[in-house]
Image (cartoon, rainbow, N blue to C red):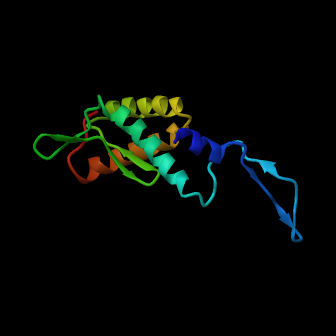
């Protein structure tokens, strides 16, 4: 199965149409194939693996009587959940490290701004989060 998937992506090219004529093929060296039904599946499977590795030793937040919730996912958006700023930063660093192992790059500065903004909002609207 892996060989078949690699073959779909290996040596991919795209063409530019100009005045109804195709120009020379351009090699696609990274990214995903547009309109390929396999691309989102591969992305989600990979990201699910990364998130399960990150969440394995994370405290998260209490969920129900004996469960924990460490993240919320929607498409390619991730929300890390933790009891403190320190725990969130640890999870974020772990996410960055694990994602890089499978070739994904996480924009930590953007993620960090979002995390801090959510924490500040929570502090003003409900019980403050632990520092």
Above or below, 52 against 124 in this view is above
Locate the C terminus and report the quarter of the image it occupies: top left
Asked whether, in this view, residue 75 is left or right of residue 26, the answer is: left
Residue at the limit of the structure toward the left, as seen here: 65
Tell me the residue at 39%/32% (across/down): 89
For residue 53, which quarter of the picture?
top left
Expressed as whole percent of the image width and height from the top left, the position of residue 77 reads 44, 51
Looking at this view, is 13 or 68 the one in front? 13
Q: Residue at x 25, y 35 (%)?
A: 130
Q: Is residue 121 left or right of residue 114?
A: left
Number of marks: 0
- On the image, which quarter does residue 19 sit in? bottom right
> Residue 104: percent from the left, percent from the top?
54, 38
**Which residue occupies 87% across, 54% down?**
24
- Residue 109 coordinates in the image, percent (x, y): 52, 39
Q: Which of 58 and 108 is in front in this view?
A: 58
Q: Residue furthest bottom?
A: 20
Give the quadrant of residue 15.
Answer: bottom right
Which residue is drawn at the image coordinates 45% and 48% (left, top)?
Answer: 44
Q: In this view, does 59 lie above or below 33?
A: above
Residues 77 and 124: in front is: 77
Q: Where is residue 102 in the image (x, y as percent from the top left)?
A: 52, 33
């Amino acid at each position: 199965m892996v060989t078949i998937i690699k073959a779909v992506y290996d040596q991919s090219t795209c063409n530019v149409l100009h005045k109804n004529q195709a120009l020379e093929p351009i090699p696609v060296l990274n990214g995903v194939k547009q309109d390929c039904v396999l691309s989102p599946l591969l992305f989600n499977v990979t990201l699910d693996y990364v998130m399960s590795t990150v969440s394995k030793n994370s405290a998260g937040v209490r969920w129900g009587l004996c469960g924990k919730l460490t993240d919320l996912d929607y498409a390619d958006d991730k929300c890390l959940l933790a009891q403190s700023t320190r725990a969130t930063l640890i999870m974020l660093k772990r996410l960055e490290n694990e994602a890089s192992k499978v070739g994904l790059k996480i924009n930590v500065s953007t993620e960090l701004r979002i995390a801090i903004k959510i924490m500040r909002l929570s502090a003003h609207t409900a019980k403050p989060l632990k520092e």
